[in-house]
């Protein structure tokens, strides 16, 4: 019964989405003629009901997983009655069909949110926005109904399920996909706002202010998702790296880069009514990158370490949806943007100028990642097989990234509209001095390469510069979004410092040693005390007991080499000790059968700053979001 | 210029769309092609693993086409492959072998149980020769022509229906 109810809710939601598109057309037309207030009310309510129906369908799917209803194919494939409750729930979205249902649920709920909370936007634009949101939803409902139905029954029902991949039984991974999805799909609202604004030729500050909280919200989730995903890859894969430029990682990085650019350009549009066409373009690009990311992951046309179900039929369906939505939005942009008047202009040396620079640099990085990710496809079309590795991305993106760090330091110190070079230099004197000293110390005394040294210097400069906007201000009366900006920029500095410190000073040792021997890595002497068998619920392992000593302090580490019987897989469980000044990362490898074991150890100074910085950036976004929403609400009350 | 710029994103997207659609219609060729095909055998000088058979000296592997089989006694697919190798031997094919990370006793037992198709067996205790050949696992079989050049690499075990193809390639490699 529950499965049928879920399917019914899905079909009903599809029907409501169709009605929503038609009502949107009526409401927008009516609003332009000064009538149609009732149609608009109906439109808002239909959007809310559509969201609730999608939410109900998703809730029913989770219920099926919690109850372990083994007459439903998806539950059989991805769950087991003995599994802990949290992994039963996570099993609902830990597969293709469930994750697509989650995708469309977020899409519909976000549309409902716009219908409920958006009060200040012109009626016609809001109607067109809700129509666009419903039109996107229809495509994905159709995809679920015709190519990925999560509620299919099996007859006869098996006694129990086939479980979840043991590797995926990790609390971090259970909540990683939903976080990223909230970010990906949250950007759909920005996309719909852009389409609505283009349709109604209403690109201006009101549109930007309406769009901003949604962009911020989606961006916060993307930031958390990427940061957490990076840490997961770091401790789970046992390769000692924290970013691998894998297509699936790039798929999450590209929307983040576009959303970061959008976040800054939307501020120019909201505050100064500039960058109209550019902001609309970015709003389209950001969600397009989310959809392309999903497509790359789901279709299996790019080879990745992330093994998802590879299915060309589904890939074809999603590609058709991409063609319709992205192609349609870009065609609309081409047809309409010529009629949008140019916004306010500004001088080169101004806050706007710095934000344009930020946007250009972010776009270049986005271009690099995009080309690097898709180039294997181009080569394949030409009959050559290749893969693009980290060196390309690092060489091409790192210098641009460092220029961006410098721009981030300068931007917030500039006045809107026009400023003087001299004033800027004056304000930057202290940060540049601190950065220069840091660079000199690291380069000359630390003996690091110039690139990571420069990165550390720029990070120090940004860290100092980022707090300058708070100096000589009444801290209690400073708006919350200023604090948000300060914290986020500081987070970037912290994260870059972590990356540079890891790049410049990490020490790696690979040794084959017998029990009783030791290997020195960084400040630690690591001794192999014992290698012994260990067992877990569904794995057996070889576990090394390592004793790491530094100035008399000792740490015990237990890296494992795990063997899962079903499916037969080997995994490395790295043992990581987190210290104040870095992490000691150890992995046990093969034995040679004569008592020697391969031990791989890294000393990674200050590597944790990478993720600490990422979470600071997300926290800054949250502060900013709260501040913006409170201010909007106050302004709305003043208007009324 | 401005008009061009306005339509540039759509044009770019159309390009990407065509590319991705192409990739979807014609899926990538995921088979791994050996970089060694078409090149002479690398210089290999391997000691005999068994006292009863010579080892492998790549300079001597010339004059007529032959198979070079990379195997190990601890490898299960190699057992499945053994009858096919015996059939090839009966058809008059000379088969040489590289035993990877193995011991004489274990190989002796393996050949007693599964038959012995090999003319020579080289000892590759560290897997170095295997890597020099561009082989990543066992079993793999290289077809070497009469001039000592690699003309084909068969990855995985040889099945019964692979035999005619291999015989044809050996004929062509004379």
Image (cartoon, coloured by chain):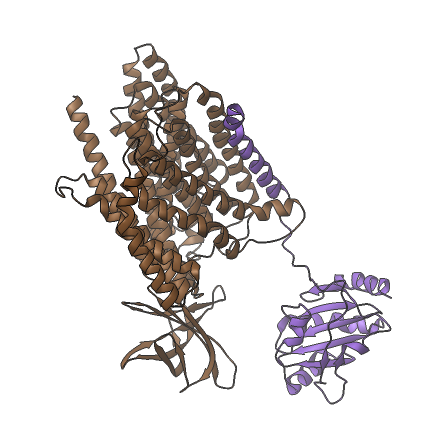
Q: Quadrant location of the C terminus of chain B?
A: bottom right
Residue at position x 56%, y 33% from top?
B14
Residue at position x 47%, y 31% from top?
A325
In this view of the protein, which residue sits in the foreground, A571 or A340?
A340
Q: Quadrant of residue A210?
A: top left
Q: Quadrant of residue A558?
A: bottom left
Q: Which chain shows up in brown?
A: A
Q: Is residue A583 left or right of residue A150?
A: left
Q: Position of residue B168 (x, y in %)?
A: 83, 61
In this view of the protein, which residue sits in the foreground, B79 or A70?
B79
Q: Which chain shows up in purple?
A: B
In this view of the protein, which residue sits in the foreground, B160 or A530?
A530
Q: Residue furthest front?
A: A422
Q: Position of residue A49 (x, y in %)?
A: 30, 29
Residue at position x 41%, y 65% from top?
A448
Residue at position x 66%, y 68% from top?
B135
Q: Residue furthest bottom?
A: B51
Residue A80 in sight here: no
Q: Position of residue A263 (x, y in %)?
A: 34, 38
Q: Is residue B55 left or right of residue A113?
A: right
Residue A257 in sight here: yes
Q: Is residue A126 above or below residue A223?
A: above
| Number of callouts | 0
């Amino acid at each position: 019964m529950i499965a049928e109810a879920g399917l019914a809710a899905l079909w009903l939601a599809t029907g409501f989405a169709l009605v929503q598109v038609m009502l949107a057309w009526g409401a927008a037309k009516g609003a332009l003629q000064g009538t149609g207030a009732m149609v608009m009310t109906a439109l808002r309510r239909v959007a809310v009901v559509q969201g609730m129906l999608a939410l109900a369908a998703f809730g029913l799917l989770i219920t099926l997983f919690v109850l372990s209803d083994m007459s439903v194919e998806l539950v059989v494939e991805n769950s087991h009655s003995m599994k802990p409750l949290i992994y039963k729930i996570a099993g609902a979205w830990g597969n293709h069909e469930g994750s697509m249902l989650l995708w469309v649920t977020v899409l519909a709920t976000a549309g409902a949110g716009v219908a409920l909370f958006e009060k200040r936007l012109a009626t016609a634009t809001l109607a067109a926005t809700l129509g666009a949101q419903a039109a996107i939803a229809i495509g994905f409902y159709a995809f679920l109904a015709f190519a990925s139905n999560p509620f299919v029954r099996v007859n006869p029902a098996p006694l129990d399920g086939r479980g979840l991949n043991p590797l995926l039984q990790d609390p971090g991974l259970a909540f990683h996909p939903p976080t990223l999805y909230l970010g990906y799909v949250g950007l759909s609202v920005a996309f719909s706002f852009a389409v609505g604004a283009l349709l109604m030729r209403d690109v201006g500050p009101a549109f930007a202010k309406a769009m901003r909280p949604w962009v911020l919200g989606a961006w916060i989730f993307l930031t958390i998702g990427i940061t957490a995903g990076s840490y997961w890859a770091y401790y789970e894969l046992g390769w000692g790296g924290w970013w691998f430029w894998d297509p699936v990682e790039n798929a999450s990085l590209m929307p983040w880069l576009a959303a970061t650019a959008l976040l800054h350009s939307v501020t120019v549009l909201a505050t100064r009514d500039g960058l109209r066409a550019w902001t609309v373009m970015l709003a389209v690009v950001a969600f397009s990158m989310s959809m392309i990311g999903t497509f790359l992951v789901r279709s299996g046309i790019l080879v990745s370490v992330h093994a998802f179900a590879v299915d060309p039929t589904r890939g074809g369906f999603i590609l058709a949806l991409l063609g319709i939505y992205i192609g349609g939005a870009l065609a609309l942009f081409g047809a309409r943007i010529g009629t949008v008047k140019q916004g306010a202009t500004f001088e080169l040396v101004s806050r706007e100028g710095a934000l344009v620079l930020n946007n250009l640099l972010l776009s270049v990085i986005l271009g690099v990642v995009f080309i690097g990710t898709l180039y294997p496809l181009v080569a394949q079309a030409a009959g050559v097989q290749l893969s693009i590795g980290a060196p390309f991305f690092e060489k091409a993106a790192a210098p641009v990234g460092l220029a961006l760090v410098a721009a981030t330091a300068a931007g917030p110190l500039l006045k809107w509209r026009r400023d003087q070079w001299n004033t800027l230099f004056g304000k930057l004197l202290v940060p540049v001095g601190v950065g220069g000293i840091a660079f000199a110390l690291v380069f000359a005394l630390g003996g690091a390469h110039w690139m990571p040294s420069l990165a550390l210097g720029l990070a120090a400069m940004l860290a100092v510069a980022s707090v300058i906007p708070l100096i000589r201000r009444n801290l209690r009366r400073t708006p919350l979004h200023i604090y948000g900006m300060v914290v986020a920029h500081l987070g970037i500095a912290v994260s870059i410092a972590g990356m540079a410190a890891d790049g410049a000073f990490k020490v790696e040792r690979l040794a084959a040693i017998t029990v009783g021997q030791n290997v020195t890595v960084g400040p630690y002497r690591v001794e192999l005390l014992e290698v012994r068998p260990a067992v877990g619920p569904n794995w057996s392992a070889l576990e090394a007991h390592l004793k790491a000593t530094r100035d008399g302090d000792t740490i015990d580490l237990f890296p494992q080499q795990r063997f899962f019987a079903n499916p037969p897989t080997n995994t490395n469980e790295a043992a990581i000790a987190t210290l104040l000044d870095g992490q000691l990362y150890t992995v046990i490898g093969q034995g040679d059968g004569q008592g020697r074991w391969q031990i791989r150890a890294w000393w990674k100074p200050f590597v944790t700053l990478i993720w600490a910085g990422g979470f600071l950036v997300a926290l800054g976004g949250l502060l900013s979001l709260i501040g913006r929403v409170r201010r909007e609400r106050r302004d709305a009350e003043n208007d009324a | 210029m401005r008009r061009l710029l306005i339509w540039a994103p759509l044009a770019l997207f159309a390009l990407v769309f065509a590319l991705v659609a192409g990739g979807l219609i014609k899926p990538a060729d995921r088979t791994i092609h050996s970089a060694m095909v078409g090149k002479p055998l690398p210089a290999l000088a391997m000691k005999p693993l068994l006292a009863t058979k010579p080892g492998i000296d790549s300079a001597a592997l010339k004059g007529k086409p032959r198979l070079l089989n990379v195997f190990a006694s601890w490898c299960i697919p190699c057992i499945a492959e053994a009858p096919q190798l015996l059939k090839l031997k009966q058809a008059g094919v000379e088969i040489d072998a590289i035993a990877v990370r193995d011991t004489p006793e274990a190989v002796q037992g393996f050949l007693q149980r599964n038959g012995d198709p090999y003319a020579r067996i080289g000892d590759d205790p560290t897997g170095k020769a295997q890597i020099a050949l561009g082989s990543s696992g066992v079993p793999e079989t290289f077809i070497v022509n009469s001039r000592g050049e690699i003309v084909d690499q068969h990855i995985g075990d040889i099945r019964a229906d692979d035999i005619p193809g291999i015989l044809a390639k050996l004929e062509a490699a004379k």
